[in-house]
Amino acid sequence: MKIYLDLVLFLNFAFDFILLLTVSLVLKRRATIKRITLGSIIGSLTIIVLFVPFTTLTLFITKILLSIIIVISTFGLKDIKYILTNLFYFYITSIILGGFLYYLNIEFSYKNIGMVFYHKGIGINYIFILLFSPIILYIYTKQMKKLKEYNTYNYKVDVYLKKDKIIRLNGFMDTGNTLLDPYKKRKIIVVNSGLFDNYMNDTNIVYVPYESVNITGLLKCIKVDKVYIEGLGIKKDILIGITNDKIKMNGINCILNYLLLEE
């Protein structure tokens, strides 16, 4: 079997360069192209360890140490948490791209008759790494950013009513919701109608005037004992505003008051 070492080194360099660039974009590390290139060169040279007769455990430990050297060379050395975060995303990104490569190689390079698979002689790894890996990792980067932004404003909410009743909600912190009760300055959390129908009575309902673009009206609100918001703690003097407009966000059924962050 012939091994073209120059081709292997080049492909390994390209693979590592794309991975390190993606990690830099996802974590906003501001690594220069020179640092990313240096890390990629070190990564491409590590292919040599595959030709050394290490045991399985020794090879595993060696790969971990080399990965640490790669991320330190690329992103610098600050503290243990910084290094571990870089290393974690380096491996996660590598697994995602490697998984795509493996899947597409199986799809295009093998045919099957029933449960029997055989090689068709068509390998796409080289072409795929050079042409399509950046596209896949670009999509991955965009989705990771959206997920981080979504999780930043997504909270678990427990609403405590009288008689030890608890309603659990998924809340979204909306900068557009700064509704206040004009009488007692209570902050208002907006929820979908129907969630509190069984807990409304004449003694716990408050009507709060509100005004939006070309619209004025009264918002039906419910007085509650307290609200627990994950990450923000227990909040009192909160009103639950009932809206007939469906909250059109995946998995979200209440809109938190942005003024809660000021506390």
Image (spheres, rainbow, N blue to C red):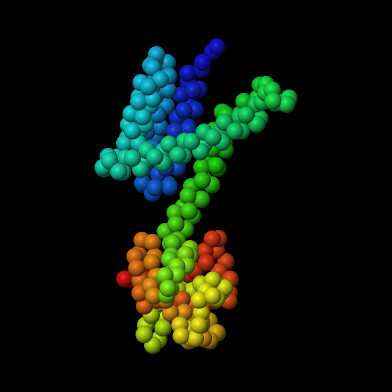
Task: Judge from the rendering whether residue 234 lies leftward or rightward of residue 102; answer left or right.
Answer: left
User: In this figure, what is the number of numbered marks?
Assistant: 0
Where's residue 76, x and y in %? 30, 40
Residue at the spot 47% in from the left edge and 58% down from the top edge: 150
- Where is residue 54 shown, x and y percent of the image? 38, 16
The answer to whether residue 120 shows anywhere in this view is no
Residue 119 lies, with reference to residue 229, above or below; the image says above
Name the residue located 41 percent from the left edge and 38 percent from the top edge: 90
Q: Nearer the viewer, residue 130 or 243?
A: 243
Looking at the rendering, which quadrant does residue 116 occupy?
top right
The residue under the point 36% across, 85% down is 184
In the rendered image, which quarter contains the N terminus? Answer: top right
For the point 56% across and 33% down, the residue is 101
Q: Position of residue 249 (x, y in %)?
A: 55, 64
Please, which residue is most extreme toward the front here? 163
| Residue 112 in picture, x, y percent from top left | 70, 26
Q: Is residue 20 above or below residue 54?
A: below
